[in-house]
Image: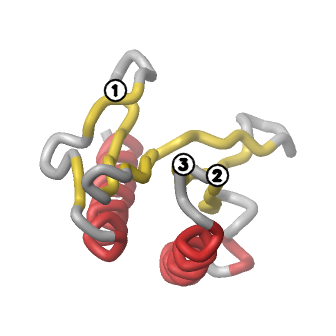
Amino acid sequence: MMDSRLQTRVKDHLDVLMADIRPQPSERKNHDFSYRLSEALFIIEKQEPHENSDVITSTPLVKVLHLEEPEAWALYVLNDESNWQAYETTSTAADLAQALVAVRSIIASKASEQLIGDNV
């Protein structure tokens, strides 16, 4: 569990991450990103409109769990069956900065997968 000081620090870092990865305001109706933060973890989500609708759907991209003993951050992504699994290259990161670098990498990888899928 994160204490309130750590949770505030995580929120600040996530706000910076969101400022970096979110599209321009005019493009946010087509796709966007958000996060959910709790005492134990945070989840980065991609938001897109549902087909031919104004309803927005959120799809989790990465889950980052705070571990206490020893302090670390465990990264999880959804597999093809929509179950959380440890992220293949870095299942744990020693500090928050390393975890966020991995999160950026995961998001970039998911974005390139989608671009490739859209062009096939």
Name the residue at 45% across, 45% down: 63
Q: Nearer the viewer, residue 37 or 33?
A: 37
Task: Report whether 23 appears left or right of 61.
Answer: right
Q: In the image, what residue type sits under mark 2?
A: Ser
- Identity of the residue furthest to the right in this view: 54
Q: How many marks?
A: 3
Which comes before the other along the chain, label 2 or label 1? 2
Local crowd size for mark 3, using a 10 Å CA cut-off: few (<14), some (14–19), many (≥20) = some
| Rendered residue at 26%/70% (across/down) | 98
Three-letter code, disc 3 = Ala
Residue 96 position within the rendered picture, expressed as x and y whole percent measured from the top left: 36, 70
Q: Nearer the viewer, residue 17 or 24?
A: 17
The residue at which mark 2 appears reads as 38
The residue singled out by tag 3 in the image is 40
For label 1, the residue is: 79
Q: Residue at x 77, y 45 (%)?
A: 56
Asked which secondary structure carries label 1, the reply is loop
Q: Secondary structure at mark 3?
A: loop
What whole-number distance in Å separates the C-alpha atoms at marks 3 and 1? Answer: 22 Å
Amino acid carrying mark 1 in the image: Asn
- Indicate the position of residue 64 as horizontal and vertical percent values: 42, 51
Closer mark to the observer between disc 3 and disc 1: 3
Q: Quadrant of the C terminus?
A: top left
